[in-house]
Amino acid sequence: MILAFGTERAPSERRVALVPDAVKTLVARDITVRFERGAGRAAGFPDAHYEQAGASGHDSLAGALEGADVVLRVQPPSAQEIAVLPAGSALACLLRPLDAPEVAQALAQRGVEAFSMELMPRITRAQSMDVLSSQSTIAGYRALLLGATLLPRILPMLVTAAGTLQPARVLVIGAGVAGLQALGTARRLGAVPFGYDTRAAVREQVESLGARFVELDLETGDAEDAGGYAKAQDEAFYRRQRSELAKHVVQADIVVTTALVPGQPAPLLIEESAVAGMRPGSVIVDLAAEKGGNCACTEPGQDVVRHEVTIVGRTNLPAEVPAHASQMYARNLVTFLDHLIDEESGRLRIDLEDEITRGTLVAHAGEVVQPVVRERLGLPALPADAHTGEG
């Protein structure tokens, strides 16, 4: 089997699909690994390290991909990159099929077997392949550090000869992987952390990190779907939630928002009036900026100041910590490949009866096969079909 990866060309993307240690693991399994020279440079991995791990470097993406059976990426491929993908090859990356379903359709037309890593089912045996969790861990850590850096005050309490400095208050909205990491980081830095989530079940996780769980006077009902994600609520709920959250937002020095509903715009949780009520110099780090943001003042891709409050709207925080983000992402990919590769033949085995394979497979045998992606493309539903395929 030939596996290939190249340089990520999306703006501000510094991660790489494979790190040298991951290459070493794959080569030990008799997989030929090719890479485009310079692919890991932005993440701190020089070409020489890949070559020492057993990979062969090529001067162009097309050269690295020629004859490849499997292609690994971080971001979705552009039209130009799709054009050099070998027909019949398999692609695994963060495909964003719910946001850009046309990419999945182009891959199907190219004859590529495409896997979307963010569609990984939230089941126990898939935890080591869960890219969203690994990258959210990095994002939550980075978000709190950005808030601490931009805040014109320090986070911990200090008792000095010059007086006592009170600790900063940190409010994290959304206690998923990113939110919990932000809370833990805030606690380690000496701030007083508060965590809020519509899912009451996460209270114990918030408190286990030394944070205080924020309770709002709201009826949340069944706020969690079968996959463990927060469910979308109606606008009346969000309106009441914004009013209640504002009382806590105005008391915080740093607010980190993480609320996302898969495949939908980010819910608005912080109104401009709440921002205006915060102390001058306070910071909001909006991890939902890519989907429009949880804050009314968020401008995706930019850091802005509104009402003397800094609102951070960066859309790819994991790429700001590319070495460890790439290391974790590569481990997810290698584990996923282990799942797909047939031990006897050493080839990919696409078993549509397997929950992990079926859940992540977006393009197969020339068709877009994920029902929700087909719906977004306006395509008719495929007939029920369960079979296995060899790749």
Image (cartoon, grey):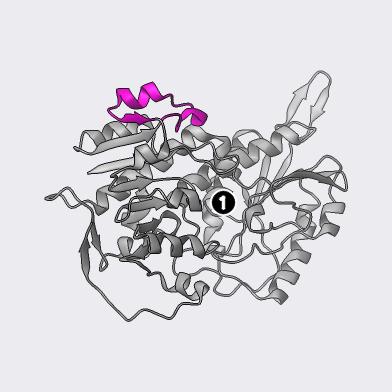
Percent position of residue 123, x then y: 36, 60
Percent position of residue 276, x then y: 87, 53
Kindly identify the residue that appears in the image at 53 percent across and 36 percent down: 14
Q: Is 112 within the magenta?
A: no
Kindly identify the residue that appears in the image at 45 percent across and 65 percent down: 105
Is residue 122 among the parts visible in the rendering?
no
Q: Quadrant of residue 147?
A: top right
Q: Quadrant of residue 107?
A: bottom left
Front one among 287 and 208:
287
Q: Is residue 64 left or right of residue 273?
A: left
Kindly identify the residue that appears in the image at 67 percent across and 37 percent down: 146
Percent position of residue 100, x then y: 53, 61
Percent position of residue 219, x then y: 65, 74
Q: Name the residue that disc number 1 marks.
A: 206
Kindly identify the residue that appears in the image at 50 percent across and 64 percent down: 102
Front one among 282 and 183:
282
Badge count: 1
Q: Quadrant of the N terminus?
A: top left
Callout 1 environment at 10 Å: few (<14), some (14 to 19), or many (20+)? many
Q: Which residues are magenta?
A: 37-58
SS for callout 1: helix
User: Type of residue at label 1?
Assistant: Val
